[in-house]
Image: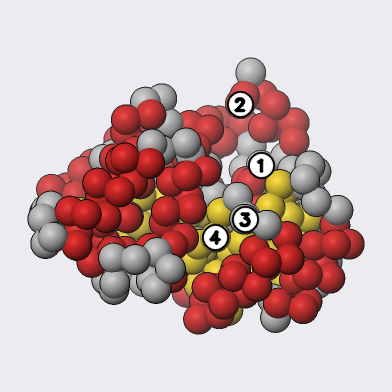
Amino acid sequence: MAGHSKFKNIMHRKGAQDKKRSALFSKLSREITVAAKSGLPDPEMNPRLRLAVQTAQKQSMPKDNIQRAIDKAAGGEGDNYEEIRYEGYGPNGVAIIVEALTDNRNRTATNVRTIFSKNGGNLGGPNAVSHGFDRLGLIEYSADALDEEKVLEAAMEAGADDIQSDEETHSIWTEAEQLHEVAKALEGALGEPETAKLAWRPHLEVDVKGGDADTLMKLIDALDDDDDVQTVWGNYSLSDEELERLGG
């Protein structure tokens, strides 16, 4: 249950990339609405809603916005969003999974296909790349806040399957079906996590650098900027040097 994590290179974190807070809050509101409609509109009784609310709180989403999204769902108001997954390829054969919440399937499909084609990628068919990933639960804690040994002990006690720590993050992996149970146990031992969600973990990573890295980041940024796209996952890895160059 130990190892070095490159997860910060695997998922493009929208929290650091979204230029407009309103766009981020809109995406968070969609997830809260869908979660509330999928079960009881009470975070204490609805595990998915609880995680959605926690994520929104971590992103400093106002309490009124969160409650408004829950109330709309409880009252049968608001749009009915459909969960859709798109799969495709970026430069150097990088596999990409795009998760979306949409009220217009045709619009979203057209937008995602156009983004791929205009940014050096190709949209594939259903299950084109997901066979190269595992669908797992992911719980993350800041490395600054907790000691690795303490996290390891708590993760083992909570029934987690794997933990990877680096200088930024403790990433705790679980079976998808055990995410809520493990997250709740960890919260009791370590406090509220930074994130707790279902994730796509690649079997193998593709090292990307130079021009391919530039193209890949443009593709991921363009996907992430689409209103209907919730999360973008990939099997790419970027070296520290490459991350520094891109950040500069």
The disc placed on residue 238 is 1
> In terms of sequence position, does the residue under pointer 1 or pointer 3 come before the other?
3
The disc placed on residue 58 is none
Q: Quadrant of the N terminus?
A: bottom right
Question: At numbered mark 3, what does the secondary structure look like: helix, strand or loop?
Answer: loop
Mark 4–mark 3 distance (CA, rounded to whole Å): 9 Å
Q: Is residue 239 above or below residue 5?
A: above
- C-beta proximity under 8 Å, tags 2 and 1: yes
Which residue is drawn at the image coordinates 41% and 25% (left, top)? Answer: 19
Q: Nearer the viewer, mark 4 or mark 1?
A: 4
Mark 1–mark 3 distance (CA, rounded to whole Å): 29 Å
The disc placed on residue 196 is 4
Quickly name the residue at label 2. 246
> In terms of sequence position, does the residue under pointer 4 or pointer 1 come before the other?
4
Q: Nearer the viewer, mark 4 or mark 3?
A: 3
Where's residue 151, x and y in %? Answer: 80, 62
Label 2, residues with CA under 10 Å away: few <14, some 14-19, many ≥20: some
Mark 4–mark 1 distance (CA, rounded to whole Å): 23 Å
Question: At numbered mark 4, what does the secondary structure look like: helix, strand or loop?
Answer: strand
Q: Nearer the viewer, residue 28 or 85?
A: 28
Question: At numbered mark 2, what does the secondary structure look like: helix, strand or loop?
Answer: helix
Residue 216 visible from this viewpoint? no
- C-beta proximity under 8 Å, tags 4 and 2: no
Which residue is drawn at the image coordinates 11% and 62% (left, top)? Answer: 76
Residue 160: quadrant of the picture: bottom right
Quickly name the residue at label 3. 192
Q: Nearer the viewer, mark 4 or mark 2?
A: 4
Residue type pointed to by label 4 = Ala
- C-beta proximity under 8 Å, tags 4 and 1: no
Where's residue 202, x and y in %? Answer: 58, 64
> In terms of sequence position, does the residue under pointer 2 or pointer 3 come before the other?
3
